[in-house]
Amino acid sequence: MNSKILSLKEEELCKILLKKEQKTITEDSTIIIDSHIKLALNVLEDVTITIIHQSECFARVELLIERNKSVKLREIITHNNAKYKRKAHQDPYSTLLVSQIISGGEYIKTDSYLKEKSTYNLTSAYYGNQLDLIIVNSSTHLERESNSNLIINGAAKESKIYNDGIVSIRDAADDCSGHQHIKNIVLDSKTTITSEPILEISNHNVSCSHGASTSKLDPEILLYSNSRGIDSQKATQLALEGFFHKALELTSMKEEDMENIISKVFS
C-alpha cells in the first residue's frame, strides 16, 4: 500500500477523542461498538469473543491473551464508514483464532504480536457495494516457534479497495512460520482492488510464504449455471457464498444471515 495514504489515515484517526474502557474477560462475551472507544480486553480464560461494529465510529481494541489460553474472536464490521483497529498481544503457548466478516468500513487494521509457541490464525472475508476501504491484516513474530496463517478473501462492486497483509519476523523468532494468502474478486469494471502482501524477515531460520491474486469471477461458473436455468446474478451470488463459506461458517452465522450479507453486494 502507499505508505503516505496509510500515514494520513492514521493521523486523521489520532485526532478522534476516544472513550477509554478496560475489561477482564473470563467468559464468552459479545461487544457492540456504537461510540468512539479505546477498549482494552484482558483475557484470562478460554473464551469466544464477538465484536460487532455497526456504526461510523472509530474503535481501537487491544487484546491481552494470557499464557496457555485459547481465544476465538469474531469480528463483524458492517457500517460503510466504520473505522476499526485491533492489536493482540499473545503470551507464550496462547492461541488466537479470528474469523472476520467485513461488509462495510472505511479503515480496518489488525495485528497480533506473537511470543514463544503462540498461534494466530485469521480467516477474513470482505465484500460490498460502493466501498472506499483500506484493510491491513498483519502478524508480528517476536519469539521462537510462533505460527501465523492469514487467509483473506474478498469481492467488491463499484468500489476502491486496498487489501494488504504483512508478516513480520523479528530477530529472536527462530523456527517460526508465517503465511498469508489474499484472493480478490472484481465484480465490475468500476472496481479497483490493490493488494501488496509483504514479508519483513529479520531471521532466516523460518518458514514463510505470501501471495495475492485479483481476478474476475470464473466465467465458466456463470456459463454452467446459465445452462442449468440459473440467471447470472443468482449464479454470482451462489458462487460468492461458496467463496466466503469458511469465514461465514466460523462466525456461526445462520444460513439466512449469510445470504442477507452476501446480497448486499447486489443491492
Image: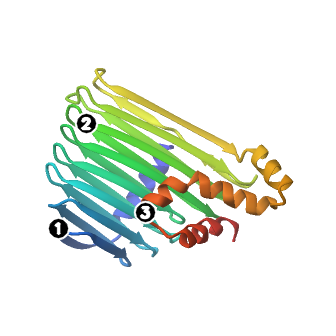
| 210 lies above or below 262 | above
Q: Which one is closest to the eye, mark 2 or mark 1?
A: 1
Q: What is the crowding at mark 3: few (fewer than 14 residues within 10 Å), some, or many (at least 20)?
A: many
The residues bearing labels 2 and 1 have C-alpha atoms spaced at a distance of: 24 Å
Q: Which residue is located at x 80 percent, y 49 percent?
A: 224
Specify the amino acid type for callout 1: Thr
Check disc 3 and report its element: helix, strand or loop. loop
The residues bearing labels 3 and 2 have C-alpha atoms spaced at a distance of: 24 Å
Could you say where residue 252 lies in the image, as x and y percent from the top left? 43, 65
The residues bearing labels 3 and 1 have C-alpha atoms spaced at a distance of: 20 Å
Q: Quadrant of residue 8?
A: bottom left
Task: Provide the residue designation for mark 1.
Answer: 26
As drawn, the label of residue 175 is none
Q: In what quadrant of the picture does the C terminus appear?
A: bottom right
Task: Provide the residue designation for mark 3.
Answer: 251
Specify the amino acid type for callout 2: Ser
Could you say where residue 176 lies in the image, as x and y percent from the top left? 28, 30
| 8 lies above or below 194 | below
Residue nearest the viewer, comparing 110 with 220? 220
Residue nearest the viewer, comparing 156 with 124? 124
